[in-house]
Every structure is written in C-alpha cells, then in structure tokens.
Image: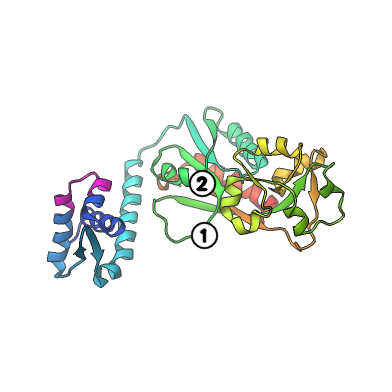
C-alpha cells in the first residue's frame, strides 16, 4: 500500500523529471526519494520511470496514474491543513493581497463592513502581482487575496476561491485629449497614441488590452491616473473609472469597432483551513453583495 510520502515523491519526480531535483524540492536526499518510488513499483509490480541520461522519464503507466496521484496528494494536504487548524483561532489581522484589477470601491466596501463587524481585527491591503501570492495564500494562516480569476483545472497549490463575476472595461483619457473630442475613435487612432496599461491587465489578455505599439507599463493605478492627466490613454474597469469620470478628471473614449466592452473576472482566494471561519464567511458575504450590484 502506498503512503502520502510515496505519492509526493512520485509526483515531485514526475514534475521535476529528476530524482535529484525532486529530492531538493521535498527537502530529502535522492536515495530516499528513489526508495519511496521503488516501494510503489515493488508493491504493484510496475515501472514508473525510465532513466535517460540524467532524466527520469515517466512510463505510460506512470502517466496514467499521475493525475489521480496528484489529486490524492492535494486532498491529503487539505485535510492536514484542516486538522492542524481545527482549534479555535484568534485573529488579530488579515493580509489581503490584491492586484491592479480590483476596484478601489470594492476594497473600501470590504474594509467598512468588516471593521464594523470585527473592530478588533485589522485588515492590511497589500498590492501584489497575481503569481506572487497564490502559494502564500494556500500556506498562510491569515493571508487572503482579491485578484483576477483565471479558469484552470491545474491548481498547483491547495486553496479555495469564490468567483465574483466579471467587470467591464472602457478606454479613458484626459478630457482635453483629442481622442476625447472625437465622437467615436477608431482602433487605428488609438494605435497612434501612447497607451498606459497596468501589468496585471496586460498579463490577463495581452492581445486584447495591449492596443498601441507605444505601450507604457505601470504597476499602480494612482500613478496611471496621474499620467493620464498629462496625455495618452488607458483601459480601466468601469468601477475604477467611475469616480474620475464623475469628477471629469477623465473622459470615456467611444471606440468604433467595440460593440460591447471587454470583460475580466475577479475572484476571492483563501486558505482551505479558513473556509469555515466566521471572518472569512463575512468577507465572502460582503463580496457577494458587491458583485451582484457591480459585476456580471
């Protein structure tokens, strides 16, 4: 019969393509990893890897077993996380990571509602890129995230998420910019002007959101708004743009070739061990109310 250690050794070797690399990743020595895989092979009379030079190459049998083995490993990690955190936790703060796609109005609503319900718990709002934080969220004890949703079945680290829906995006510029004075601008006109874009938005769908050859990357939304006051144009979510449009700091650019605005999804990510905690349940409730009003 296989154990959790046997399966983690198998999955790590399959993913790394090397006993040595798998051992380094797991914090074990190469001999231990090889012995754990050999135990599976002996128990079931199968061969999992062929050695080709320095590479451990999966056999057809191993490829057939890999996805199910990975699922068992993830389920075991989730169960372990639940059991390790089964005692009543006392939270003093949560770190909520977010990317540039998250509307500031959403952040403000969560902050306001959460502070009223749990005045003794602090919320720290930390701006990060998406790929930096999923592993931190999955392994942390008080780390949460709001960021772009990407549909995938290949979840490399255990976490839970709530898909809030999609928000629409529009093109904006300074009200005095020539693009704002056109009744309808064409894509070709947009290509002639410099475009500011956040890294997260470009990473989401570069072919859709990166229009102009003169593309300027910005990490922070506040910086992007200040730059737009000087010139150029940018794509912003409707929620992000609304307060600036209302104050006439920005103007929306109507685009000839765009019949309906492009959209991108937002999701709330949290550790498996925290999914039943009252604080996280409250945040989910607040997010759901906001999403029903603002997202599609």
| Quadrant location of the C terminus in the rendered image | bottom right
SS for callout 1 = loop
Does residue 29 belong to the magenta stretch? yes
Depth check: give the residue in front, 120 or 10. Answer: 10
| Quadrant location of the N terminus in the rendered image | bottom left
Q: Say which residue label 1 marks.
A: 151
Q: Label 1, label 2: how many angstroms apart (C-alpha)?
A: 14 Å
The quarter of the displayed image where residue 16 is located: bottom left
Farthest residue, direction bottom:
60
Highlighted range, magenta: 23-33
Q: In x, y percent, where is residue 190?
A: 75, 53
> Is residue 165 among what the camera can see?
no
Q: In x, y percent, where is residue 108?
A: 65, 37
Does residue 40 belong to the magenta stretch? no
Q: Which mark is residue 73?
A: none
Q: Say which residue label 2 marks.
A: 130
The quarter of the displayed image where residue 261 is located: bottom right
Q: Are marks 1 and 2 in contact (CB under 8 Å)?
A: no
Q: Main secondary structure of the magenta part?
A: helix
Answer left or right for 128 relative to 183. Answer: left
Relative vertical location of residue 57 with respect to residue 20 in this rendering, above or below: below
What residue is drawn where x is 24% and y is 44%?
27
Answer left or right for 81 relative to 152. Answer: left
Q: In x, y percent, where is residue 244?
A: 77, 40
What residue is drawn where x is 22% and y is 49%?
23
| Residues packed near mark 1 inside 10 Å, few (<14), some (14 to 19) or many (20 plus) | few
Farthest residue, direction left:
42
SS for callout 2 = helix
> Is residue 142 among what the camera can see?
yes
- Sequence order check: which comes first, mark 1 or mark 2? 2
């Amino acid at each position: 019969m296989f154990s959790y250690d046997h399966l983690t050794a198998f999955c790590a070797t399959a993913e790394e393509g090397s006993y040595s690399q798998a051992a380094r990743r797991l914090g074990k020595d190469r001999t231990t990893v090889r012995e754990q895989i050999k135990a599976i092979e002996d128990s079931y009379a199968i061969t999992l890897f062929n050695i080709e030079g320095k590479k451990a190459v999966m056999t057809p049998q191993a490829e057939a077993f890999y996805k199910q083995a990975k699922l068992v490993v993830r389920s075991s990690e989730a169960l372990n996380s639940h059991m390790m955190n089964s005692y009543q936790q006392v939270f003093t703060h949560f770190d909520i990571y977010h990317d540039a796609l998250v509307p500031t109005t959403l952040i403000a609503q969560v902050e306001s509602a959460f502070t009223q319900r749990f005045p003794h718990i602090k919320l720290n709002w930390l701006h990060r890129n998406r790929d930096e934080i999923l592993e931190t969220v999955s392994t942390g004890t008080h780390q949460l995230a709001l960021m772009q949703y990407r549909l995938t079945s290949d979840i490399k680290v255990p976490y839970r998420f709530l898909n809030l829906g999609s928000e629409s995006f529009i093109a904006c510029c300074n009200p005095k910019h020539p693009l704002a004075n056109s009744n309808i601008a064409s894509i070709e006109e947009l290509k002639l002007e410099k475009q500011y874009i956040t890294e997260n938005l470009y990473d989401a769908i570069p072919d859709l959101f990166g229009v102009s050859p003169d593309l300027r990357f910005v990490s922070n939304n506040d910086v992007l708004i200040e730059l737009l006051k000087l010139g150029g144009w940018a794509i912003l979510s409707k929620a992000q743009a609304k307060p600036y449009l209302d104050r006439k700091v920005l103007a929306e650019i109507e685009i000839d070739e765009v019949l309906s605005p492009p959209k991108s999804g937002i999701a709330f990510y949290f550790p498996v061990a925290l999914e039943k905690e009252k604080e996280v349940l409250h945040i989910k409730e607040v997010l759901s109310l906001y999403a029903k009003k603002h997202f599609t």
